[in-house]
């Protein structure tokens, strides 16, 4: 199995997730220009040594850092993701010390090659926040150079303990439909029996 592509990044603001309330999202929006995504889980670890050797080891998930590379720093998208404001009179976007990045659901499609066949993975993170960033810039030299953006987010467990979910499917269309369902039919309590 090898990943051979990535596309279709989407996000939606997390609306409700409180005790006794079903998880809901606003309408999903596109995050245009996906280039790459790197996921780094962070764990709390403990080791117990005795008799000059390791006797017990424990590790538990805490959060994961999501590093995304994209072709464009779309102001409208990052106003959503970082809590920035747009002045209606001037059209200026403002980054303020009081901005609060909202929790969002986030996902994308990964193309994979499995036994010579292309598969498509709908990958979803139910609860995350993005960090403030400023795009790089440099003067034009003899050769043209594209500058892309890299933005980091922190994904954390949802109210049910899930920090990531995915499903592999045979077609891109099916994967796109499944990714959309993550936003419209959010992950529910795994301990609640499903109806027939």
Image (cartoon, grey):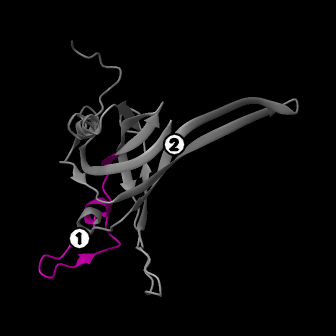
Image quarter of residue 190: top left
- Extreme residue toward the right, this view: 52
Relative image position of residue 171 (x, y in whole percent): 30, 34
Is residue 91 rendered to the left or right of residue 45?
Answer: left
Q: Which mark is residue 62?
A: 2
* The magenta stretch spans residue 80: yes
The answer to whether marks 1 and 2 mark residues whose Cβ atoms lie closer than 8 Å is no
Q: What residue lies at 47% left-to-right and 43% top-to-bottom?
A: 3
For label 1, count other residues whose C-alpha is less than 10 Å away and answer few (under 14), some (14-19) or many (20+). some
Residue 151 placement: quadrant: bottom left
Q: Along the line of sight, which residue is nearer the eye, 24 or 27?
A: 27
Mark 2 Cα shell of 10 Å, populated few (<14), some (14-19), many (≥20): some
The answer to which image quadrant residue 88 occupies is bottom left
Look at the picture and state if 85 lies above or below 174. below
Name which of mark 1 and mark 2 comes first in the sequence. 2
Rendered residue at 27%/76% (across/down): 94
Residue at the limit of the structure toward the top, as seen here: 196
Place of residue 10 in the rendered image (x, y in percent of width and height, measured from the top left): 28, 50
In space, the residues marked 1 and 2 are separated at their CA atoms by 31 Å
> Going 35% across and 72% down the picture, which residue do you hit?
97
Q: Is residue 134 above or below residue 111?
A: below
Q: Is residue 39 found left or right of 194 in the rendered image?
A: right
The residue range painted magenta reads 79-108
């Amino acid at each position: 199995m090898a990943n051979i592509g990535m596309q279709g990044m989407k996000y939606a603001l997390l609306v409700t997730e409180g005790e006794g309330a079903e998880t809901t999202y606003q309408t999903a929006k596109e995050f245009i220009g996906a280039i790459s995504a790197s996921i780094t889980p962070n764990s709390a670890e403990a080791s117990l040594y005795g008799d000059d050797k390791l006797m017990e080891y424990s590790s538990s998930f805490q959060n994961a850092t999501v590093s995304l590379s994209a072709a464009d720093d779309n102001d409208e998208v990052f106003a959503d993701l970082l809590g920035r404001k747009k002045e209606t009179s001037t059209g200026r976007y403002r980054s303020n010390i009081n901005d609060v990045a909202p929790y969002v659901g986030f996902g994308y499609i990964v193309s994979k090659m499995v036994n010579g066949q292309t598969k498509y993975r709908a990958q979803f993170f139910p609860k995350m926040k993005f960090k403030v960033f400023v795009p790089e810039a440099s003067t034009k030299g003899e050769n043209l150079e594209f500058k892309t953006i890299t933005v980091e987010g922190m994904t954390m467990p949802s109210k049910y303990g899930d920090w990531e979910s995915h499903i592999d499917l045979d077609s891109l269309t099916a994967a796109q439909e499944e990714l959309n369902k993550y936003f419209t039919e959010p992950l529910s309590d795994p301990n609640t029996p499903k109806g027939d």
